[in-house]
Image (spheres, rainbow, N blue to C red):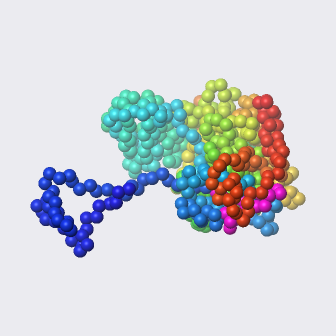
């Protein structure tokens, strides 16, 4: 790289005069007719480093790699930066036993360096990407997404004004405009206005406009909109049009009615159960969430207060489904408002290392059940090991299947967790909302349907309500959202009720253990009511409190619940105590590559790679084959 031009003289004064000549040390040169001086700057945009997790892999008969040896090896590399050390919690009195992963080193390095280290690692060292986590909410509007079609040309500015009842401006509404090229988006200001620039054609080529309000209104999708060059006004319908006098008058969501929550005694409220919500935090200033007082922000050095700042609204929405209490306002009904809720914040920017930290928190805090409305397109052996450890410790992990319209995402595809797909119900949302776009005709059975976004596969244990789910959002409002993110807290809330009040789970003899987790999963699955007849999309069906055997539920049929006022026209597997993460371990350690940990090259290391015992068929693989056969896929 060329050095930056230095325009300062040794004496701090500019050399030269106004006639264009510059005096140098050995003479002078005229500026007339000469090339202008070239100024260079240091480039500030470069390939960003990748983040990796490095830890010892527990293998029977193989000596573990000491953490300090791993740390010393990494510190000896000039282009590797140690970000943090994730030390396990919950050992001692709450130890999950031998075979668990110990301390994890999080390091940043060039991606090429990371790949080389991963390829050369010995069997007793894990090196894997510290991938970013994703929320299990709607994956996007694929019907109008032409992001791969490059459309050059002059951009056109489209001005949108979003209003509610009586023309009241709606700030913080997100507006998406879909044309022939990349979609444009923006957020409305205090006047309810936003201007977005769209490339790829004239205004007549706009295919759709989608408006997602921040709170208290239904979203709206307009296809083939007629737009002008001026301000285009869109009006949204308030939720109170559907639910009269809401939130002053309370409502029970369609999914909760379908699950018979409205038929149980108010005294059954999850007392004594500890629930964890691994998400984006929780705004406990919301009138229905003021009783949630425990949490930690794992994105901010485990701060004990900033977990209440939910910039993404996602965690607050999940918390409302699980535990909203009708104290200051009637609003919505949560499943377990008297349970002890812990908000474990990993968003925004959460990674596998943060999820591992959150699961350690769940073990250490002795939580009974944890909601994980998250996922990743990547896999992690270390996360998989930690989920097995959590289950052994008696923590039941309820995980969203994902919204990629494809196979179940990680970690929902692991046998150690209880994976939830989404279901919807016709007549519960406006026909011009985006919720209606998720209805696929060949996946409808009566009023119930499997939405197009939900992931599917033999790992689906059960389905939960996940379309047009009204719940709490920061600032005291409410929003109707879609996703397996919304389906999962329905099952978590139901699980909390079962743990607190089901006769087979509430006894003192049923201490926190892996056996209790397996029993809870079996009761949840056995209480499922199928509508579609497709176990890859609904598992054992939609759970029902009556079918689950909870006392105090009125006898009722398994037909879809009646519409609300104003509404629009496979059993869980018991995971063996053997590790269920073997599928993420490297299949082989071959190749002529640099091996700083004493892997392939035989380079000196205090713990050179020990010989691997001959592996048999992994228990997790046998279980997966059994699941596929039970689903009729083998």
User: Can you tell which quarter of the image residue 409 is in?
Assistant: top right
Q: Considering the image in quadrants, where does the C terminus appear?
A: top right
Q: Is residue 575 visible?
A: yes
Q: Nearer the viewer, residue 270 or 155?
A: 155
Q: Is residue 619 left or right of residue 215?
A: right
> In the picture shown, does residue 404 fall above or below 337?
above
Residue furthest front as drawn: 26
User: Can you tell which quarter of the image residue 363 is in?
Assistant: bottom right
User: Can you tell which quarter of the image residue 444 is in?
Assistant: top right
Boundaries of the magenta span:
53-70
User: Residue 20 lies in magenta, yes or no?
Assistant: no
Could you tell me residue 59's position as x and y percent? 79, 55
> In the picture shown, does residue 418 fall above or below 405?
below
Could you tell me residue 218's position as x and y percent? 52, 40
Q: Is residue 257 left or right of residue 519?
A: left
- Residue at 54% over, 39% down: 140
Q: Is residue 532 left or right of residue 146?
A: right
Could you tell me residue 570's position as x and y percent? 79, 37
- Residue at 79% over, 64% down: 94
Q: Considering the image in quadrants, where does the N terminus appear?
A: bottom left
User: Residue 56 lies in magenta, yes or no?
Assistant: yes
Residue furthest bottom as drawn: 11
- Residue at 35% over, 57% down: 2
Q: Nearer the viewer, residue 531 or 134?
A: 134
Residue furthest left as drawn: 19
- Residue at 66% over, 47% down: 591
Q: Is residue 333 visible?
A: no
Could you tell me residue 539's position as x and y percent? 75, 37
Q: Nearer the viewer, residue 197 or 25?
A: 25
Q: Is residue 300 left or right of residue 38?
A: right
């Amino acid at each position: 790289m060329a050095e930056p031009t230095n325009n300062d003289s040794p004496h701090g004064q500019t050399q030269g005069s106004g006639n264009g000549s510059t005096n140098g040390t050995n003479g002078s040169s005229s500026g007339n007719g000469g090339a202008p001086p070239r100024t260079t700057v240091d480039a500030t945009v470069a390939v960003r480093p990748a983040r990796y997790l490095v830890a010892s892999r527990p293998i029977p008969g193989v000596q573990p790699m000491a953490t300090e040896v791993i740390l010393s090896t990494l510190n000896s590399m000039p282009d590797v930066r140690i970000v943090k050390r994730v030390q396990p919690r919950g050992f001692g009195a709450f130890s999950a036993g031998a075979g668990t992963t110990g301390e994890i080193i999080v390091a940043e390095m060039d991606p090429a360096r990371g790949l080389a280290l991963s390829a050369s690692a010995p069997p007793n060292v894990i090196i894997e990407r510290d991938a970013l986590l994703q929320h299990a909410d709607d994956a996007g509007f694929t019907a109008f997404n032409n992001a791969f079609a490059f459309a050059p040309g002059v951009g056109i500015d489209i001005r949108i004004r979003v209003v509610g009842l009586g023309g009241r401006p709606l700030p913080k509404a997100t507006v998406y405009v879909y044309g022939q090229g990349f979609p444009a988006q923006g957020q409305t200001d205090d006047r309810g206005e936003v201007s977005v620039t769209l490339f790829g054609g004239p205004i007549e080529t706009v295919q759709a406009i989608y408006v997602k309000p921040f709170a208290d209104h239904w979203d709206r999708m307009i296809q083939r909109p007629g737009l002008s060059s001026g301000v285009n006004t869109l009006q949204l319908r308030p939720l109170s049009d559907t639910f009269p006098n809401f939130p002053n008058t309370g409502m029970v969501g369609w999914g909760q009615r379908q699950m018979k929550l409205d038929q149980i005694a108010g005294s059954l409220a999850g007392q004594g159960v500890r629930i964890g919500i691994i998400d984006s935090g929780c705004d406990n200033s919301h009138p229905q969430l003021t009783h949630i007082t425990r949490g930690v922000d794992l994105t901010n050095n485990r701060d004990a207060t900033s977990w209440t700042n939910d910039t993404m609204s996602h965690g607050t929405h999940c918390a409302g489904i699980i535990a909203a209490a009708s104290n200051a306002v009637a609003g919505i009904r949560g499943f377990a408002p008297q349970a002890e809720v812990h908000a474990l914040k990993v968003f925004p920017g959460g990674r596998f290392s943060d999820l591992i930290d959150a699961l350690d928190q769940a073990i250490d805090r002795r939580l009974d059940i944890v909601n994980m409305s998250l996922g990743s397109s990547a896999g992690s052996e270390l996360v998989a090991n930690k989920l097995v450890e959590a289950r052994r410790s008696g923590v039941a992990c309820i995980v969203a299947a994902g919204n990629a319209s494809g196979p179940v995402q990680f970690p929902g595809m692991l046998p150690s967790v209880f994976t939830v797909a989404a279901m919807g119900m016709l007549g519960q949302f406006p026909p011009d909302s985006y919720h209606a776009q998720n209805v696929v005709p060949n996946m409808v059975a009566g009023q119930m349907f499997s939405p197009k976004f939900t992931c599917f596969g033999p790992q689906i244990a059960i389905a939960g309500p996940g379309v047009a789910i009204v719940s709490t959002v920061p600032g005291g409002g409410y929003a109707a959202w879609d996703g397996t993110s919304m389906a999962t807290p329905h099952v978590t809330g139901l699980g909390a009720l079962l743990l607190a009040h089901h006769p087979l789970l509430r006894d003192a003899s049923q201490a926190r253990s892996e056996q209790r987790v397996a029993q809870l999963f079996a009761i949840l699955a056995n209480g499922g009511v199928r509508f579609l007849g497709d176990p890859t999309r609904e598992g054992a069906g939609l759970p029902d409190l009556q079918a689950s055997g909870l006392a105090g539920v009125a006898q009722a049929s398994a037909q879809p619940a009646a519409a609300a006022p104003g509404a629009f026209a496979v059993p869980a597997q018991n995971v063996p105590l053997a590790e269920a993460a073997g599928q993420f371990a490297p299949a082989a350690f071959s190749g002529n590559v640099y091996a700083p940990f004493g892997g392939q090259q035989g380079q000196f290391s205090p713990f050179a790679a020990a010989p691997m015992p001959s592996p048999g068929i992994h228990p997790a693989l046998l279980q997966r084959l059994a699941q596929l056969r039970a689903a009729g896929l083998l």
